[in-house]
Amino acid sequence: MSKVSYPTGVENHGGSLRIWFNYKGKRVRENLGIPDTARNRKVACDLRTSVCFSIRMGSFDYVAQFPNSPNLKLFGLGKKDITVKELAVKWLELKKMEITANTMGRYQSVIKNCLQLLGGRKLAASVTQENALVFRKELLTGYHLSKKNQIMPIQGRSVPTVNTYMTVISGMFQFAVNNGYIVKNPFEGLPSLKKAKVEPDPLSREEFNRLIEACYHQQTKNFWSLAVYTGMRHGELCGLAWEDIDLRAGTLTVRRNYTQMKEFNLPKTDAGTDRVIQLTQPAINVLRNQAELTRLGQPQQIEVKLREYGRASTHSCSFVFNPQITDCTKRSGFHYAVSSINRTWESAIKRAGIRHRKAYQSRHTYACWSLAAGANPNFIANQMGHANAQMVYNVYGAWMSDNNQSQITLLNQNLCENVPSVPHKLRKI
């Protein structure tokens, strides 16, 4: 019987063929699981040639070529047994260095619900796209099907919130893919749920006056008046200090924001770290009124978290709005929290008999009133802390078109004042 000749790198192993090749300085063998025949030896040779060529070109994907190979562990590739909870803990710990504490708090809330619905003890590699779709459905409808096939009511979420949840969890599973814990991200490629555009619902002048009159204390009146006259975020108003204000120049500099996590950080703005607000006369009048209440307050040294991880700065702040002047118990701190401010809005709305709106509509009211007065969208965007006017066009486009007639009136007035009159040519009669 003649001896069987094997191509280079192809050998018989227990009656089946296997190939060997060098990868990252080590000789590895891969069982092909096919019978040792002349035809299969040629196929094995061609496969080895292809693998060696891919390795030389730097395009070889070991996981894709041999997904079940025991050699994957040798190179730190392929699936690693990790539960969804273990993955979440690892991902959040590493994510902490690139996001703010406020964002981390939101991520932790998302992960908590993910563990409840997907199952924290479940292997991350076993989560399928169907599981992802069921997770999305349960978030939206507010009903969860337990392991015992019992329908359990949970808190339903709005479409924008569900889309945010899906984005966060997809990022976590993509981390798992990138680090070899799973082969494919089950949340990848799922389209976002369509959401209706939420139109701004500003206060009318008459509603605004009723709201201010319904506030019990002068400081509360001043807070919501300044919110409407400047369009500032409520966390920025809570962190506003007299050191940030120049009433002679008519400017206010936004330097910090107080978050839901009860810490100060840099303002949430796409335009930069600090932004300067040009104060209108009504805003200046409100601040002069408030100065009689808090201008001589004791400065407080506070820590403001910077965007660079682990770094902070100390600010000396005499807070413009101090809850101690309205607190009979004297147990309040030196500045408001956003949650307590929102409660004053809710109370004033009810007492004024105004249709309910969220407190954030104070910001929309500023933008809509400014547009109605003929202000430039770029100026409004700068005042509100947007990088450009695109956000103003997207959110307030309808308001801009509704005020076309006032714009024509404004143009006619300015052109009549500034354009020299041109005599008409006399016509022969």
Image: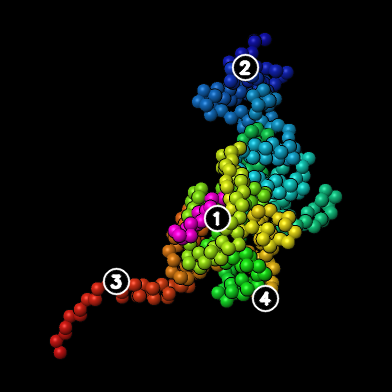
Distance CA(mark 1)–CA(mark 3):
40 Å
Would you say residue 204 is visible in this rendering?
yes
Q: Nearer the viewer, mark 2 or mark 1?
A: 1
> Horizontal placement of 332 versus 227: left or right?
right
The residue pinned by badge 4 equals 353
Give the camera-side residue of 160 and 80: 160
Residue 229 lies in the magenta-colored region: no
> Residue 89: x and y, percent?
71, 38
Task: Find out whether the residues at labels 2 and 4 contact each other: C-beta distance under 8 Å.
Answer: no
Q: Which mark is residue 27?
A: 2
Q: Label 3's element? A: helix
Q: Secondary structure at mark 4?
A: loop
Residue at position x 77%, y 42% in the image: 120
Q: Is residue 232 above or below residue 110?
A: below
Q: Quadrant of the N terminus?
A: top right
| Of callouts 1 and 4, the N-terminal one | 1
| As drawn, 186 above or below 328 | above
The residue at which mark 3 appears reads as 418
If you read the primary sequence from the N terminus, does the residue marked by circle 1 or circle 3 appear first? 1
Name the quadrant of the C terminus. Answer: bottom left
Mark found first going from the N terminus, 2 or 1? 2
Q: Earlier in the sequence, mark 3 or mark 4?
A: 4
In the rendered structure, which segment of residues is drawn in magenta?
Answer: 241-256
Residue 88 at x, y percent in the picture? 70, 40
